[in-house]
Amino acid sequence: MSDATDDPTIADISELLALMRRLRDPDGGCPWDLEQNFSTIAPYTIEEAYEVASAIEAKDYPGLKDELGDLLLQVVFHSQMADEQGRFAFPDVVRAICDKMIRRHPHVFARGSAKTQAAVAQAWEEIKRRERGAKPGQPASLLDDVPSALPALMRAVKLQNRAAQVGFDWPSAVTVTDKIAEESRELAEAAASGNVEHVAEEFGDLLFAMANLARHLKLDPEDALRAANAKFVRRFKAIEAGLAAKGRTLDEATLEEMEALWQEAKRTE
């Protein structure tokens, strides 16, 4: 295995590629790795991406190094399987992303002009539209190539952004809040009816409207919900600690006791 530098402790990508080829070698490779295919590995790819995000959120930079390595392994794994099938190889993946980045940054690598973040984003979307139009068998709908496997909130924002490109959008955050109020009323009416399918539909509509509000407020709803989850965990742990200090358990506590400890944790924060 080759190294990119004279330092034997630093591995380059060729070492990882060779390691993956060895794991997938029918002659003495790993039985588990040999049994995998694109579909079975895909859930691990998604999981590793989330673990990268989790390390970033926690500012765990040593952990981030490890998680980025795990995510890189996923790219190498998929590339190796594709190479075995004669579809493409890892260098093709690298070439494709390099070409795409150069193509989508004409303000850096060519004579394009984009001086602000907003201008860059607008140019990026325009280039993507041209790329979609240049592909054979292009999607019949503007929304067709928004991946269905994305987390639902993330996909909602991408669908809304795509529709907004052609002017199908709420004019402001205020109008979206009006829509949220409307969807809340419809959800309450559905809940009163007892029709489970109708409740689920209206609840989905409310979440979709909330994602739209996040988009208009320039927020990532996934990030906002992760932060709310973390806050809930902190405050619930404070309840547990407060009860433990009194020699009591969650099972023994009343709702009033837990609520008082929750409010105390909230005041402390």
Image (spheres, rainbow, N blue to C red):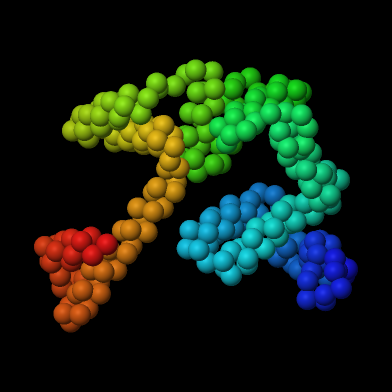
Drawn side of residue 202 relative to residue 35, left or right: left
Residue for point 25% across, 72% down:
240
Q: Nearer the viewer, residue 106 or 187?
A: 106
Drawn side of residue 211 relative to residue 41, left or right: left
Of all residues, the one furthest to the top in this rendering is 167
Q: Nearer the viewer, residue 200 or 60?
A: 60
Query: Where is residue 62 shown, x and y percent of the image?
Result: 58, 70
Q: Quadrant of the C terminus?
A: bottom left
Residue for point 33% across, 33% down:
206
Residue 62 appearing in the image: yes
Asked which quadrant contains residue 49, the reply is: bottom right
Query: Where is residue 212 shown, x and y percent of the image?
Result: 41, 32
**Image: 116 above or below 50:** above
**Image: 150 above or below 227:** above
Residue for point 48% across, 28% down:
160
Asked which quadrant contains residue 144, the reply is: top right
Residue for point 31% across, 58% down:
232
Residue 100 appearing in the image: no
Query: Where is residue 18 shown, x and y percent of the image?
Result: 84, 64
Of all residues, the one furthest to the front in this rendering is 115
Q: Quadrant of the N terminus?
A: bottom right
Query: Where is residue 112 shown, x and y percent of the image?
Result: 72, 28
Asked which quadrant contains residue 73, the reply is: bottom right
Query: How many circles with numbers are drawn on the protein?
Result: 0
Drawn side of residue 217 relative to residue 101, left or right: left
